[in-house]
Amino acid sequence: MKNYLENIDREALRARAEQMLGYANDARSQASRWTDYAVTRARGFSLFDFAIFEACLLSLGLWLGSCFSKFFRKFRSVLFVAFAASWLYLFWRVFFDCDEE
């Protein structure tokens, strides 16, 4: 064990850690920019848009829950279609609807 610890290239480890820290900082800044953009766009949502958002979350949760329940298993396709439709509407509203700008 002592011989192994003496052979570790600490500079290479330090350089690798700094590289990984740089990747993490880049990912954090990308996520921050995307979140800021989404929040800015969501400020212009109407009550209807928030209702669609809630329907999206509800249908996704029910669809995922239907994987574990025999009762909802027969409604999986309907739940998935509801989720997909509401998600596509929100995706369009956030990224492609430029009426408010």
Image (tube, grey):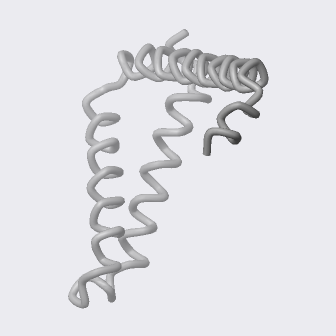
Farthest residue in the front direction? 2
Measured as percent of width and height from the top left, residue 78 is found at 38, 74
State the residue at coordinates (34%, 35%): 49
Q: Nearer the viewer, residue 85 or 58?
A: 58
Closer-to-camera residue (41/25): 25
Q: Is residue 34 above or below residue 1?
A: above
The mark tally for this picture is 0
**Which of the 4 quarters of the picture holds residue 80?**
bottom left
Which quadrant is home to the C terminus?
A: top right
Residue at point 54%, 24% (across, down)? 31
Q: Position of residue 98 (x, y in %)?
A: 58, 19
The relative height of residue 36 versus residue 88 in the rendered view (above or below) is above
Instruction: Give the quarter of the image for residue 45.
Output: top left
Question: Residue at left 31%, top 50%?
Answer: 57
Q: Residue furthest left?
A: 71
Q: Does 92 appear above or below 18?
A: below
Asked where in the image residue 60 lies, by quadrant, the reply is: bottom left
User: How far across and down, in percent of the image, does residue 89 sit?
Assistant: 49, 44
Residue 73 placed where, x, y %? 32, 86
Image point (61%, 45%), residue name = 1
- 74 w.r.t. 59: above or below: below
